[in-house]
Structures are given as structure tokens and as C-alpha cells.
Image: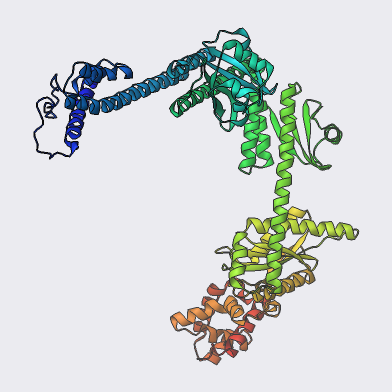
Amino acid sequence: MSRDHAQSAERSVAAGLADASADDRSGDGAPSDAAPSDAAQVPAHDGAGTDPAPGSAEAPFLELLARGASADAYEQPVLIARAEGRPAQEIAALEAVKPLALRVRSELEGRRRREAELSALFETAHDLAGLRDLDAVLQAIVQRARSLLGTDVAYLSLNDPARGDTYMRVTEGSVAARFQQLRLGMGEGLGGLVAQTARPYVTDDYFKDDRFQHTLTIDSGVRDEGLVAILGVPLMLGPHVIGVLFAADRRARVFEREQIALLGSFAALAAAAIDTANLLTETRSALSDLERANEIIRDRSGVIERASDVHDRLAELVLRGGGVHDVAAAVSEVLDGTVEFAEATAAPAEALEASRADGHAVRHADDWIAAVAAGGELLGALVLRGHPGLDPVDQRTLERAAMVTSLLLLARRSAAEAEQRVRGELLDDLLDARDRDPRLLRERASRLRADLDATHVVLAARLEGTAADADQEAVARRRLWSAASHLAATRHGLAASRDGGTVLLLPLEPGDTATETARRTARHLGTAVHDSVTVGASAPVEDLAARPEAVAAAYEEGRRCLDALRLLGRSGDGAAAEDFGFLGLLLAGDRDIAGFVERTIGQVVAYDERRGTDLVRTLDAYFASGMSPVHTKDALHVHVNTVAQRLERVGRLLGDDWQCPARVLEIQLALRLHRLSGAGQR
């Protein structure tokens, strides 16, 4: 505590003592304004920090406080006053001020003690922060604990998990060798009890305390050291006790609560120091191991770097959904060669079988073959071209890449099969009209990235090749369904197996037609299955979620077109009802008469409506007159040149082949339907 601080405290104490003294003098029942005698008069204190008069009752006690006298010295002012025969009132004033002075002395001593304790804890924490030697830090802890608690001895023991006991680690003030080498079993002695219960224990007289187990070895060591009063607190790391910190005296003593708490604070710092030292030891050990590992890594750095690089690349490919060719490209770059994925039928059979049986890549001429297999099924091979000399680690890299390739292929197959089943189930529901809730249909389609509100075409597809037996036919149908499902997935459509063939529901692209979609699908599926595939398409359908029954009707129309193609000898082709002219009216499910008329003579009708001409009536008269312009002009009562001009206009609207027999038949049927519908009547 600084001198200024002490003087300030003394002045405050003087003020308190003066007030207390005045209170004591006025407390005898006399009126508060009665003037005391001169002998008992205490000089007034103005509270402004001035020192009390030398003759006041507080003065001798302030002098004792200023020089830090012992508690016994506070009896002297009263004894001196009595010996000198001073007035009774002055002696009474001194008696009244003495307990207050002793209370102030106790407070000041407590503050000094707490300041010293905090300073010691701070210094210990500082030592811990700069920990270099665990023994030195623990020694400093027990030294400060002994000094602050004023004990004869302080020591610290640590638990030994291997032996199941606790042993002496650091001592301060100890003089007995046997005591410094003590080992305490769990529950033996005061320290063993603390270590076992994780609670502080204190004894005023060790040998008279029967709360813990006394043993000959421990008692002999304590007796050699001459200890009587012992305080022990646990060293805790989390919920575990790792040791005990002790303070002990060679005489009977009562340890106060503040002293127990102080020793507990030192124990916490000791536990932290031990934990930090253990971490440092582990760190040094790990660093040493790392140094040895680095030496090994440096020996094979080139190979390890390549293996690490390919591992990272393969992991990235798997995470971002790469394909087998991406794996081959990544391994090619790492191995500084050309790696290709080959189908099982395209790889050298003998080397491929040897690689699958052995589980390792095998050399074939100047190439290396690593089988891509799963569950006994050969899925293909990774082939490293023109690289006869291959490091063993690089060989394992090629084998690891083959394993990743097999996993990718299996994952793709499983995902594709699952998605194909889900797409097929939704299309089955649409065809069978079991689920008519538009909201549920849209939600199911949305999960498959399909939009039932878009315009679609229903396609019926069937293989044309003949299978040798039922098993081969089933395999061929599965191939067709797999190819159709893949096409549907890429086009955001649906596909399902039905009636010995496959049915697809594909969105109609802007500017596309049902015919073009059917022909393109036939070519795509035929190429995929290496066989002829015939495809019949329906007319475009809309609002499938709201009208699921339209899918079934469209499928029947597509099947009729498929059957018509096969009857007409156009197997392997694709077509829609609109491709069959007037026959399409019989194939179409909704008998789209207006659509047939529009496709056949729609441009002529529209021209008449825009220009107010009579091209439709001229065509009727032309066909009714046996396609004779002369007879036509008589029927229309116009000049023959007018007829010629009108027919020339019709040719420009319908095309140059409008008078060929097939077109003439369709145009006459369209004119008849147009007239019967009432649209052709003026």
C-alpha cells in the first residue's frame, strides 16, 4: 500500500474515530448540546483532511496504525492514561476509540493480505503464461502458497493412473526424505481422501483425526516431518482429479475459509500449468513425429504428390457428379499419359480377365489394363496407353481410378434406374387415370423436372427385330425401355413400358411438330438399341394435369399410327396422324376434322377471308367440272382467263403438286368437309 494511500486512510480513520468518540461522550444521557469538561474535550475535526490534535483520543491509535503496530500495542494508550491518572472521561474516550482502531487495523491488514494474495496469483499466472519448465512453475506455486498462508510446509502430489495411487511431486519447507518420497493410495491419508473425493479437507491435528485411513507408511512420513495441521485441496482438470496441493504446519492450527479458497486458487493454476505442460509435451512429440514423417515424405515427394493430386481430382469429380471420361482425363494428366475408358467388349479380353481376377492393373504390351468391375460384373476397363514403365504408386493410382469409375457407373445406374421407375410410375398413373388430383400430379412431375402444363406428344414405340427366344425378347424390351427412359429424362418427359413396347410423353418444342418428334425419336431409339424402332405419335395434347384422361386417349392414337406404319411397310419410321392425309381422320383419336381442313386447304380459305375472293368456290367448281377450266368458267360465269388466274393463285398457296392424284383426293375431301361444316356457305 502506498504512503499517500495510507495517509488518506488515516485521515478517514481519524474522522471516524472523532465522530465515534463524540458519540460515545454524548451517549451518557446528557443533552447533546451540553458542553463537556475541558479534560474530556476532543478537538473538533472539520473533515477536510487535517490531522487531529495531539491531545485527542484518536491520536495515539492513529500513530499505531501509521507504524503498523501489533494488536497488543493498542492496549498501551489506555494503560498509559490510567498510569498517568488522567481524567475518567479521557480514559473512557480512549476505551471507546480502541475497538474502532482495532477494526480499522483488521480491515487494513485484510486489504494488505488480499493485495498480496492477488499479486501472488497474478505472478503465478504470469509464470504459467510463459511456461517453459513445469517443475519450476509448480515449485513457484508451492513457495507462494506457503508464504501467503504462513505455513511451515507446502507440497503438491500428482495421481498416477497406471499404479492407482498419488505421489509427491514438489515440496517446499520439507526436511524429511521419507516424507518427500511418499506414495498414497486412493483413500489413504488426508491426501488420498482428497484425491478420491475431489473435495478439500483440513485437519487441525492429523494424528487425532479419524475421518481418513491412517497407514503406517504415511503416518511415519508425516511424523518424520513433524506435521500436525494439514490443509489439502484437489487439482482438477474438468471433472477429474489429477493431484492435491497441501499447506501444513508443525503445530495445531485452524485454517480459515479465505485461506482454503486461496489455496484452491493456487491449485487451479497448478492444474492449468500441468495441462499446458502436457499439451506442450504432446505438441513436441507430434512435431517430432511430423519431422520424421516429413523426411519420409521428402524421399517420395514426387510420387506422393501425384497420388495426392489424383486423389483430390477424383474426389472433386465424384462430388460434382463427373463422368467416367472425366476420371480418365484427370488420371491422364496426373500420370502424364493417355488413359481411356473402354467397354468390356472393346478391351483385350485376356488382360481384362486377369486384372479382374487379380484385382490389380496388368500390363498388356506397352499398355496397362485396369478392370472396372463391381460385384463380379465387368463394366469396362481403364487403359493407360504407351506407358510400359509404371511406378508402383502410379499403378495403384490407376487401380484407384478404376475403382472410382466403377462406383460412378454403379451410382449412375442406380440413380437412373430409380428415376426411370419413378417416371414410369407417374406415366402409368396418367395412362390409367388413377390419380386425378392436378396439384399432386404437378408436384410429382415437378420433382422429375417435368411440366404437365406444357404441350406434349404421346409416342408409342416398338422394336421391329425378331428375338430368338422369350429371354432375348425380354432383354431387347428392357434395352428399349432403358433408352426411352434416358431420352425422356434428358427431354424432361416421362417413359414407361406398356403393351410389349414403350410409351413416351415428351414436351413439344416451339416450332416442332408431332411428326418431326416421332421421326427423331425413332432414329434416336434405333441407334441406342442397335435395332429398328417404329414410333407412332399422337396429336399435341395440353393441360395434362387437369385432364389426365387425355394421355390415355393420345396413347391409343399413337398406337393406331404405329400399327398403320407397320401395315404400310414403314417399320423403323415415325409418323403422326397428320402424315396420313384423310386416313389420319380415322387414326386420330378425336377425329380432328377442322385440323384436317386447316392443314389441307387452310391457306386458300384464309386468303378468301382476307381478300374477299372466291378461290374455294372456284376449286369446288373446278373439281365438279372434271378439272376443266373451260367447263369451270361456264359454271362460274366468268372468263376462262379469270379461272386460270385463280387456279394459278391456288397453286402458289397449296404448292405445285396440288393437282397430283393423292393431293386432289385430300383437297376434294377437305372441300367437302368444309362445305358440310357450313363454313363454306356464303
Quarter of image, res 220? top right
Query: Along the horizontal axis of the image, is 451 left or right of 585?
Result: left
> Residue 590: x and y, percent?
65, 80
> Residue 568: x and y, percent?
77, 71
Q: Is residue 353 visible?
A: yes
Q: Quadrant of the N terminus?
A: top left
Residue drawn at the location 71% of the way across and 58% of the way down: 420
> Residue 124: x and y, percent?
44, 19
> Residue 403: x and y, percent?
74, 36
Residue drawn at the location 67% of the way across and 15% of the way down: 217
Q: Is residue 386 visible?
A: no
Residue drawn at the location 63% of the way across and 44% of the way down: 321
Query: Along the horizontal axis of the image, is 356 left or right of 579?
Result: right
Residue drawn at the location 45% of the way across and 27% of the way down: 256
Q: Name the colouring of the figure.
A: rainbow
Vertical order, 153 against 516 (above or below): above
Q: Nearer the viewer, residue 353 or 217?
A: 217
Residue furthest right as drawn: 469
